[in-house]
Image (cartoon, rainbow, N blue to C red):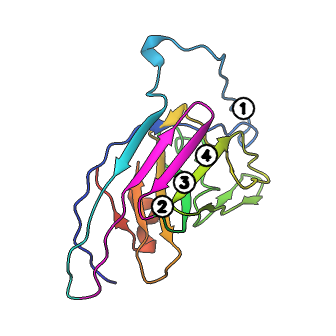
Amino acid sequence: MRAFPRRWSAGISSFPILTAGLVTGCVVMDDGTKSDEDASPQSETVTWEGSAGDTGEESFDVPSVSVSWGTESVVVDVSDGGNWQLGMAETGGSCGAGVPCWTGEDCHLGYEAADGTVYGPYCHGISDGLLELSYGGNLTDLEPGTTVFQEAFLGTVTYVVMPSDGELPCLAFGDDPDYYAELGCLVLSL
């Protein structure tokens, strides 16, 4: 495994997903109203930056990755303008304590429902460094350009950005980068 020195700076917020229908007795409801005290940082853009110096091997300049959660979609921008694959896994919040975490869009393992049905693993293609995903995706048949995730669930997601060039490392960041440990990604620290 190649080691890449790095310097990272990041901030993260949290976001939940709806898993209604996947667990008997669990229904997430939203009345559509928000008060000032439960308002999440809407339309927030978080940028992770880093660079890798000369390792004695091939040098790799780590691109900046910005994630903007808006009211209708999430936008991911990779500064190198390249082609990547994005994976997102719910790894925090209330999931895991008897409530399943949505991992169908993780670009890695996928999600297995209680009835044995497997969803994914879905990957989202980043073209020319940019990707926009509209909310409202169907977990049973995720359409390109959509996601099951919603902006109200900031902070519970772990991301992976996988390069189209197999010689470059993937980048993992967010709630629990260890979720992608077996892929050997560079981890962006908070």
Task: Estimate how packed mark 3 is, as few (under 14), some (14 to 19) or many (20 or more) residues with alpha carbons within 10 Å.
Answer: many
**Label 2 or label 4, whichever comes before in sequence order:** 4
User: What residue did someone put label 4 on?
Assistant: 100
Q: Toward the viewer: 88 or 131?
A: 131
Per the image, is 114 magenta? no
Label 2 and label 4: CA atoms lie apart by 20 Å
The spot of residue 91 in percent (x, y) is 49, 49
**Label 4 or label 3, whichever comes before in sequence order:** 3
Question: Looking at the image, which residue is at 63% across and 62% down?
Answer: 123
User: What residue did someone put label 1 on?
Assistant: 25
Q: Is residue 107 above or below residue 43?
A: below
Q: For the residue marked with disc 3, what is the amino acid?
A: Met
Mark sitting on residue 88: 3
Q: Nearer the viewer, mark 2 or mark 4?
A: 2
Secondary structure at badge 2 equals strand
User: What residue did someone put label 2 on?
Assistant: 160
Q: Nearer the viewer, mark 2 or mark 1?
A: 2
Q: For the residue marked with disc 4, what is the amino acid?
A: Pro
Q: Quadrant of residue 4?
A: bottom left
Q: For the residue marked with disc 1, what is the amino acid?
A: Gly
Q: Nearer the viewer, mark 1 or mark 3?
A: 3
The spot of residue 32 in percent (x, y) is 64, 17
Instruction: State if disc 4 and disc 2 touch (CB < 8 Å).
Output: no
Q: Toward the viewer: 32 or 130?
A: 130
Q: Tell me if 14 is positioned left or right of 21 in this view.
A: left
Q: Residue 64: tell me if it is visible.
A: yes
| Bounds of the magenta segment | 57-80
